[in-house]
């Protein structure tokens, strides 16, 4: 009659960015599981929170599997820019459990994407597509730079 689940997903379960389908679907599954548990266990006074951070410093790029050589560099770049640490996220989780808050969205950009997807879905989808196009252009520039460095 009492307890609490904290499930760790990712903003990737909300955003569903292109080229990350297997990662996105597993994180979306964690969110769906959390939503289901929340509904099933509510009457038993068992709480559920789902944590959906964006990028912060972890060993993700060391363990990720990708055929794309620029992906690791891109992920490392995003993680190095984060001002949020694992300790900050742990504090957010602690606060969410104390307040019995379902969504734990530690990063501002993650919260903005969550709101945009729910309240402005057309604009959100357009923005994801535009972001993907920018990422592809950036990656092509990076690949040309690498190829050019090998010829020098």
Image: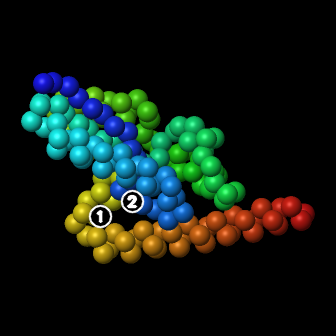
Q: Is residue 32 above or below residue 84?
A: below
Given residues 21 and 110, the one toward you in this image is 21
Given residues 44 and 6, the one toward you in this image is 44
Decide if residue 127 is on the left or right side of residue 114: right
Instruction: Pick whichever of labels 2 and 1 is earlier in the sequence.
Output: 2
User: Outermost residue, top direction?
Assistant: 2
Decide if residue 83 is on the left or right side of residue 134: left
Circle 2 SS class: helix
Spot occupied by residue 4 in the image (x, y as percentages of width and height): 23, 29
- Asked whether the viewer can see residue 106, the reply is no
Task: Report the residue marked by disc 2.
Answer: 15
Q: Quadrant of the C terminus?
A: bottom right
Task: Report the residue marked by disc 1.
Answer: 117
Spot occupied by residue 80 in the image (x, y as percentages of width and height): 55, 44
Q: Residue at x 28, y 70 (%)?
A: 121
Given residues 43 and 78, the one toward you in this image is 43
Q: Are marks 2 and 1 in contact (CB under 8 Å)?
A: yes
- Asked whether the viewer can see residue 15, the reply is yes
Decide if residue 127 is on the left or right side of residue 71: left
User: Outermost residue, left direction?
Assistant: 43
Circle 1 SS class: helix
Q: Residue at x 54, y 70 (%)?
A: 134
């Amino acid at each position: 009659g009492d307890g609490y689940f904290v499930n760790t997903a990712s903003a990737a379960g909300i955003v569903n960015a292109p080229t990350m389908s297997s990662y996105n679907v597993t994180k979306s599954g964690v969110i769906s599981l959390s939503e289901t548990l929340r509904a099933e266990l509510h009457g038993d006074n068992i709480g559920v929170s789902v944590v959906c951070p964006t990028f912060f410093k972890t060993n993700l790029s060391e363990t990720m599997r990708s055929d794309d050589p620029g992906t690791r560099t891109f992920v490392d770049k995003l993680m190095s820019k984060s001002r949020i640490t694992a300790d900050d996220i742990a504090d957010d989780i602690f606060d969410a459990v104390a307040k019995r808050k379902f969504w734990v969205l530690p990063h501002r950009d993650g919260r903005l994407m969550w709101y945009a997807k729910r309240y402005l879905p057309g604009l959100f989808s357009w923005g994801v597509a535009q972001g993907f196009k920018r990422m592809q252009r950036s990656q092509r520039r990076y690949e040309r730079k690498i190829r050019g460095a090998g010829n020098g």
